Amino acid sequence: MNTGTLLSNISKHINLTLKEEELLLSKVRLRKFLKGQYILQGGDICKYINFVISGSLKSFYRDIEGHEHILAFAIEDWWIGDLGSFTTQKPADYTVQCIENCELAQLSYEDLQFLYKEIPKMERFFRILTQKAYVYFQRRIIDNLSLTAKEKYLNFVKQYPQFEQRVPQYMMASYLGFTPEFLSKIRKEISFKHLKS
Amino acid sequence: MNTGTLLSNISKHINLTLKEEELLLSKVRLRKFLKGQYILQGGDICKYINFVISGSLKSFYRDIEGHEHILAFAIEDWWIGDLGSFTTQKPADYTVQCIENCELAQLSYEDLQFLYKEIPKMERFFRILTQKAYVYFQRRIIDNLSLTAKEKYLNFVKQYPQFEQRVPQYMMASYLGFTPEFLSKIRKEISFKHLKS
DNA sequence: GAGAAATAATAAACTAGTTTAAGAAATCAT
DNA sequence: ATGATTTCTTAAACTAGTTTATTATTTCTC
């Protein structure tokens, strides 16, 4: 499995020496998962933060009636997990599951604490990562508040064209906050407009 | 103005020596603002991250039609600003405005970078702060996806009972993502149920 | 403390989004 | 390849939430 993408992902924000890279990689756990497999089950403690080498995943909340509400997707070069559970080591609110077969680079909580001590720059890296995720979720709340359903959909496919190909529509509907039937209706309207112009 | 709340807020996550506290306070800018005053205007660069000593504020996104969409409220012992703009020093997406008269402790971007160097623990503090905010926004997305309007409202007043007293209803409606008229309707229904039981 | 301005309530007509149900298309397993 | 399962589409009836307009209430200002 290729750890190059992990190192280049980290080097976007901090510079590691060769020694530091080696130390980091010595702590990384490389694992393969099959489509449909659970990486984390809601209620369990999130032991690993996951970097996606290949494949795609979703994190979701399962409500009292058992319905899934998708919080995020992840593909190559993204991180995924329940950061709240990971940092507090308390039971997770969210479940993480593979949409496609996946190769992940996992860092355990203990190993990350060790790395924070040995390579303090890593703390900076995860601060920046968290900040970016924070900004993204803030934006999503605003989009939810200010856009129409059609705009939300167009906004999503424009921003994440990769997902449209790889993620089933009913999952996109869940992520966007509407029923699959309604998403289908929206897509129909859009394609009609396209034909006219 | 009392900087005690600021220090005790920080001491929730990291321990500062007296010297470090002094250094921090020497960089803090204490300022008073009147109800209605803008702390940050969307489009400007967020120069300060703000700790609320007293008063209340809102941060919101103003859409193309000029409508406000409230992202967050802040009262005593909370931090507020446009973290995305602050950390990147690029134009802000959001506007921050006082709901009541406010006393704020402000830290400028430059001073915070200086403090990160002099007191590396501060980096840890802001990482934890960001992580908490991140978890909060994640939760808000899930609540938006999984709760009914009535549940969203009850959830909000239960979680933030302080706000119900101090924030006008039309702002709460904006925060929750519905019209003031609809919030009024919901409140009426709930009070009827209350009378019956 | 009176008048003006801002906020909140009510209600009727409307629209966006859901539900239910059925059939079509795509994907999966053998 | 074929049947079975999963995903997607369509449409009609329905419900949640908005719009518009009017009145009541509270808060601000002088």
Image (tube, coloured by chain):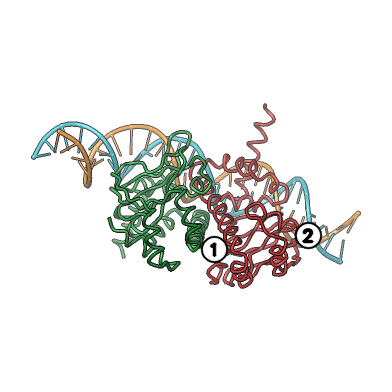
Chain colours: A green, B red, C orange, D cyan
Q: Amino acid at mark 2?
A: Asn
Residue B2's label in the rendered image is 2
Q: Position of residue B136 (x, y in %)?
A: 56, 50
Q: Is residue A118 above or below residue D11?
A: below
In the image: residue B100, left or right of residue B136: right
The subunit carrying tag 2 is: B
Mark 1 nearby-residue class (10 Å; few <14, some 14–19, many ≥20):
some
Q: Residue at x 36, y 57 (%)?
A: A25
Report the residue marked by disc 1: B63
In the image: residue A165, left or right of residue A61: left
Quarter of the figure with the C terminus of chain A: bottom left
Q: Amino acid at mark 1?
A: Asp
Q: Position of residue B152 (x, y in %)?
A: 57, 43
Q: Could you say whether the residue bearing mark 1 is in a helix, strand or loop?
A: loop
Q: Position of residue A43 (x, y in %)?
A: 47, 37
The subunit carrying tag 1 is: B
Q: How many marks?
A: 2
Q: Could you say whether the residue bearing mark 2 is in a helix, strand or loop?
A: loop
Q: Position of residue B20 (x, y in %)?
A: 68, 64
In the image: residue A172, left or right of residue C8: left
The answer to the question of whether label 1 and label 2 lie on touching residues, with beta carbons closer than 8 A, is no
In front of the other: B181 or B101:
B101
